[in-house]
Structures are given as C-alpha cells and as structure tokens.
C-alpha cells in the first residue's frame, strides 16, 4: 500500500531539489560573441573583482566564441582577443549575454542581455562627453610649456586650472544625477570608486554613497567602498596612524618614534612618473624646514631594491625610507588603503593627521604656517 506520508516526503524532496537547482542556475552566465574581422585565435575573459576571481579563455572560430560560468552578482569584466590591442570593458551578470562588434573597434562592441551594462553604457556616454573636453586643455598647456619653458605663465595656468575645475564640477554633477536615477544599481558604487577613490575625493565619495540604496551598498562594489572608508579613516584628519617597516639598511623604523616633529608620510615608487616629478618640490620643502622640526618618511611601492635605492640617490631624497618591497601587495599599502601614488599625509607633533596630499606649493605653505 502506497504511503501518503512517503508521497509527501517525495514531493517535498523534489521541491527542495528543484529549488536548489533553480538557485544554482540563477548564478549561471552564458556569453555568445561574434566579432567581425577576427577569424581565429583566442578570446580572454577577465573579471578580477569577482569573488573568487574569474578568468577564462576560449577558442575563436570565424569570429565566434562563447563563455559559460558562474557569477553571483554584476561585476565589471574585460574581454580581449589575440593580436588586438583594443579591449572591451563591460558589466557581466547572470543570464544570457550577447557581444557583437568588429576587430577594428572591439572596445565599442555592443553588449546586450545585461541591465547593469545598459546603465554602464549610459554613464560611459556621459563621461566621454566630459572627458573629451580635457584634451584641448592639456594640448594648450603643453604648447605653452614646450621649447624649454619650465612653467606656464600664471595666466595660462589659470586658464587651465579653471577649465579643469569646470570639468570636475561637471563630473560631480553627472555622478550624483546617475545615482539619483539608479540608486539600487551596482554601477553607481563602481563609478564612485572610479571617480572618487582612484582619484581621491573623500567628501564626494561620502556624498554619493549616502544617496545609494541598501541594495547598492550591499553590492560587491558597495562593500568595497565601505571597506575603503574604514581603511581611509586611519589616515583621515585627526587619525593617528602608526606602522613599523624596515628601512634601506634592513632596520625597522616605527613611525611613532618620530613624534615631536611634523612628519610627512609619502607613498611613492621609482616607477611612478608623477611621484618623480613631485620629488623636487618635496626636496625643497625638506631643505627649508628640516632643521626647524620637519621630517619625512618615504614609503616605497617598489618591488626591486636596486631600482628603489637608485631613485632615492638620483632624486636626492635625503630622508628616511622604508619598504617591504611587495608593491601593491604590501601590508602597509593595504593597511592604509593606498590606491594611487603619490599619496601623502602630514602628521603634527602628536602624530595626528592634519593634512593630506599637499602638492607643489601647498606643502611649503603649510609648513611655513606651522614652523614660522
């Protein structure tokens, strides 16, 4: 005799199995691609932000290729093809995604099937219109600083600075408008990271993130911002950072051992062009104020000691230098959330942060007010 209890148990087990299967399939993505003008080779998919990191490659035949995998939420990925310099950046999410384009302009390929990608495409058009205005500004500045001229005239510099300030204002307005339009989108936090973390602007980051819904805040990129803010608080105004890292001679240097002096903690690297360009300004400040109670600790993101030491000597950086020679993977770099170099913060005599990222004349001006 067939048991009703057994029947119900069977139905219950089947329901659970179907639910589990549905949940499993919910995270599956399938990409179908067709790139005109590209016959055979390999296609490479990279999603470095995914957890775990997603990386795959497939063969391309007659311009066609496909990827299938698992991903839990929308993430920004990169597609590249053998022999092509151009790359396509797009938002991937679970579901069926189609990529269509041509080998001459892979970065302009059309991506469909991803709602996040539609939003990213909308933002990209807005950002492109803003960014294109910067080209003529840089070209004009370059034209008046070439032929041996070291600096642009105050008038030329003001025109450039005013123009860049206008672009900055346009960017901030555009970002806020996007977040207000799509408060739950994972694209919003991604844009905040791209615009206000990679090019540090803590105030705008906080303003934009406050407008995000809880869905966006709990997304992959929302969590990255939360973590960044937590780490950044360690070097924000009023914070009292400390660390101990070995110097060029292999001896440990503890930051707090320098209390009683004004200390600039300067994150840099021998391979960093902007850092090397800024070094002469830092050298001048050091020479002018060292004897009055100013000290510098250079924290290098180098991985090769010989290049690190060579840059110190060549640039005449006569202050303390430390590094674990692990580059971006260094413990101190991660601890303090360093995303770009040069990055610096100035400590008062008690070890509290009183200023961040003082460039060019801003550093000696600040020191002059402190050590007059």
Image: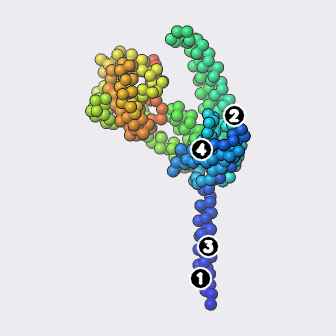
Residue under pointer 2: 104
Return the residue nearer the eye: 39 or 333.
39
Secondary structure state at the residue bearing disc 1: helix
Q: Is residue 88 left or right of residue 323?
A: right
Q: Which residue is mark 3?
A: 14
Q: Residues within 10 Å of mark 4 (few under 14, many from 20)?
A: some
Q: Residue at x 62, y 81 (%)?
A: 7
The secondary structure type at the circle numbered 2 is helix
Residue 356 sits in which quadrant?
top left
Q: Which residue is mark 1?
A: 6
Residue 6: x, y in percent? 59, 82
How far apart marks 4 and 3 lie (CA) works out to: 39 Å
Q: Quadrant of the C terminus?
A: top left
Q: Earlier in the sequence, mark 2 or mark 3?
A: 3
Circle 3/circle 1 CB separation < 8 Å? no
Residue beneath disc 4:
44
Badge 1 density bin: few <14, some 14–19, many ≥20, Cα 10 Å: few
- Tally of marks: 4
Where is the N terminus found, in terms of image quarters?
bottom right
Taking the spot 48% from the left edge, 24% from the top edge, the residue there is 274
The answer to whether residue 138 is visible is yes
Q: Position of residue 174 (x, y in %)?
A: 64, 34
Q: Residue at x 31, y 36 (%)?
A: 244
Q: Nearer the viewer, mark 4 or mark 3?
A: 4
The first of marks 4 and 2 along the sequence is 4
């Amino acid at each position: 005799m067939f048991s009703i209890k057994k029947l119900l148990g069977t139905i219950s087990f089947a329901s659970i199995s179907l639910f589990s299967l549905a949940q499993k399939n919910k995270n599956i993505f399938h990409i179908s691609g067709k790139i005109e003008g590209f016959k055979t080779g390999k296609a490479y998919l990279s999603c470095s932000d995914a957890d775990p990191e997603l990386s795959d490659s497939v063969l391309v035949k007659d311009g066609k290729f496909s990827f299938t995998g698992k991903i839990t939420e929308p993430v920004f990925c990169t597609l590249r093809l053998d022999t092509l310099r151009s790359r396509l950046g797009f938002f991937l999410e679970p579901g069926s995604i189609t990529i269509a384009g041509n080998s001459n302009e892979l970065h302009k390929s059309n991506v469909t099937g991803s709602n996040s990608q539609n939003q990213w495409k909308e933002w990209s058009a807005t950002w492109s219109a803003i960014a294109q205005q910067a080209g003529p500004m840089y070209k004009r500045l370059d034209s008046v600083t070439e032929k041996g001229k070291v600096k642009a005239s105050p008038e030329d510099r003001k025109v450039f600075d005013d123009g860049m300030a206008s672009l900055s204002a346009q960017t901030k307005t555009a970002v806020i408008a996007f977040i207000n339009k799509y408060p739950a989108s994972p694209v919003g936090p991604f844009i905040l990271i791209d615009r206000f973390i990679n090019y540090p602007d803590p105030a705008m980051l906080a303003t934009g993130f406050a407008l995000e819904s809880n869905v966006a805040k709990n997304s992959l990129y929302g969590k990255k911002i939360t973590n960044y803010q937590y780490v950044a608080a360690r070097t924000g105004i009023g914070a009292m950072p400390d660390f101990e890292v070995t110097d060029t001679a292999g001896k440990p240097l503890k930051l707090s051992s320098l209390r009683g002096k004004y200390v600039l903690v300067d994150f840099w690297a021998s391979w960093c062009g902007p850092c090397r360009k800024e070094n002469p300004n830092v050298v001048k400040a050091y020479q002018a104020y060292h004897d009055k109670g100013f000290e510098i600790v250079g924290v290098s993101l180098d991985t090769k000691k010989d290049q690190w030491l060579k840059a110190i000597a060549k640039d005449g950086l006569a202050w303390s230098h430390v590094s674990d020679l692990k580059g971006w993977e260094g413990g101190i770099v991660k601890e303090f959330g360093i995303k770009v170099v040069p990055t610096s913060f100035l400590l008062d005599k008690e070890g509290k942060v009183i200023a961040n990222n003082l460039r060019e004349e801003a550093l000696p001006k600040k020191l002059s007010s402190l050590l007059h």
